[in-house]
Image (cartoon, rainbow, N blue to C red):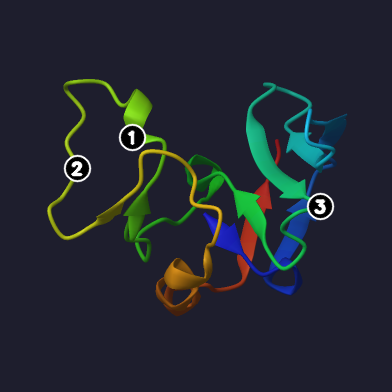
Amino acid sequence: MLVKPESFAVTRGTPKLWRQIDAGGIKSAHWFCVNCGGGIVNEKSSRPDAIAVYAGTLNDTSWMRPIAHVHLRHAQAWQRIPNNTVCFEFMPSDLEALAGKWQGLWQTVKWVTA
């Protein structure tokens, strides 16, 4: 789930950071829970206007609705995709087409590490 960096806040706990640079030179910062190792959020130098929060880490997901599915080239045969959702075989290089839909769902995101 992409959110604006200014809409994101850590409310409790201190996540652990792992940094990497991919083959194309894009820098990434991956934050994860120090207790369970679960991924929480990641940032990419190629996407400075948004951070990716793993929806499974949120306390309240009642407001969320999927607006797109990516990496479907690798989807399992049993995976069900709603007919009214935009689909991509891979991550689209231009996310502008989805920005308006995502923006409608953005809110201040808070997550907690135990």
Can you say whether 56 is above or below 111 in the image? above
- Residue at position x 70%, y 64% from top? 8
Q: Is residue 55 left or right of residue 82?
A: right
Cα gap from disc 3 to disc 2, whole angstroms? 30 Å
**Number of dots carrying numbers:** 3
Q: Is residue 59 left or right of residue 45?
A: left
The residue pinned by badge 2 equals 81
Residue pointed to by mark 3:
45
113 relative to 82, above or below: above
Label 2, residues with CA under 10 Å away: few <14, some 14-19, many ≥20: some
Label 3 secondary element: loop
Q: Give percent across and percent down for residue 15.
A: 81, 38
Q: Which residue matches tag 1?
A: 72
Decide: marks 2, 1 in contact (CB < 8 A)?
A: yes
Label 3, label 1: how far apart the Cα atoms are: 24 Å
Amino acid carrying mark 3 in the image: Ser
